[in-house]
Image (cartoon, rainbow, N blue to C red):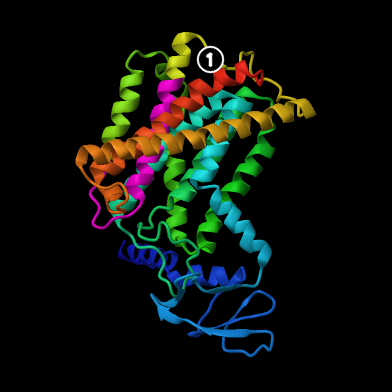
Amino acid sequence: MLHMNGAMFKLITYLQDSELVARFQRTCGLFAVKSERRRTCGNGHLQVDGTEDRSCTSDYTYQANGYNVDAASGPQYQVRNVFLYYLFLVSAALGREVFYISFLPCVHWNLDPFLCRRLVNMWAVVMYIGQVLKDTLKMPRPLAPPVVRLETRVSAEYGMPSTHAMAATTIFFTFLFSATHRFQIQFESGLLLAVLLSILVCLSRLYTGMHSVLDVIGGVLISAVLMLLTYPAWDAFDGVQLTSPLTPVVSVVLPFLLSYCYPKLDHYSTTRGDTTIILGVGAGCSAGYWLNQQLGQTSELKGPFPLPLPPLTPPTLALGCARSTLGVAVLLGTRQLAKSTSLWALCTWHQVSPSDPLTRRRREIEVPYKFSTYTAMGLVHTILLDRAFRQLGLL
């Protein structure tokens, strides 16, 4: 038993090693600038290891936090494989708001509201658990150096588990398992695509230096377990969510309380705010889908299932692009309007300045303004835009 415990400890230590992440980065052609003197080369790369190149011009930066940091350009690094660099940056974006605010609504508008509802539900549950685990386990991110960190916004967050890995696993596999019951999709091809996209997102967290191998594996396993445990109740929950008279109250009050009672932070990070955003989206969508069901104005697909996939004809593609472009633009406008209004109202109530960056970090302001903003976006997405598309002849 002691031997097994010792082997497990060594394995965990190895998987959490920052040097393992740094080796992966170097294998993929991403190298930290090691010298204090930074030389910008004619080929657009940053020269490292003190080698000479007549095409380089010199300037100086100084070591800070383990790697060269310039106030204007951030951590310095050299990219020797441009294809992998952009591949992993795009893959990392699949776990950010820019992806969620476009992909999830577009599934509703262009494919099936049922799939969007299920994705949002699972995404909210899994991400909340993942964020709470981060601030409960308090395991650090990989050290820099030896790792190059390409992102700064979430550097103050803890590492374990990787919520990018959790979100990717959850969204792609929930989509696969749900869509195969609704549409005539070849499961093997869908499985290959889901695995490929999930792997790319997971590897992007290593490439960007934001997570250890242990963080990524932990994120995948936790999300897989949560999906396995909840899968039998997916259909039953969907029915209750659409028909229960308690849905509009529970779907808004419970997520708000979970956001407000988020575990106390020992230092400020983006986890509480990001969790509030996710739960706000879930609350707005849940209430909106319920209201559509009560009014009988839902755009749900009718069986018998599985249905053939919609044909990709030029008119269909044009309508889909029009819905997506207009819908995302309206959602972005809703976010800006709701954010400005709620932040002004809360700051006026608490008699603080909205221009002070520290004001937005206070729980009594951060949670209500972000929750109300993204709840409004969820309601606009599920209720108003469907009706607008019908009026404009886009549905």
Stretch of the chain drawn in magenta: 262-288
| Residue found at x 68% / y 89% | 54
Judge by depth and name the residue closer to the eye, 126 or 277. 277
Identify the residue at horizontal 46%, vertical 74% (top origin).
Answer: 70
Q: Which residue is mark 1?
A: 298
Q: Which amino acid does the dot numbered 1 rest on?
A: Thr
Q: Is any atom of residue 2 visible in this view?
A: yes
Front residue (pair 181, 366): 366
- Up-down: is 246 above or below 194? above
Q: Quadrant of the N terminus?
A: bottom left
Q: Position of residue 8 (x, y in %)?
A: 38, 62
> From the viewer's perspective, is residue 308 above or below residue 122?
above
Give the quadrant of residue 24: bottom right
Residue 315 in the image: state x and y as whole percent: 77, 26
Residue 84 image point, x, y percent: 64, 62
- Indicate left or right for 250 with 120 as reference: left
Visible residue check, residue 230: no
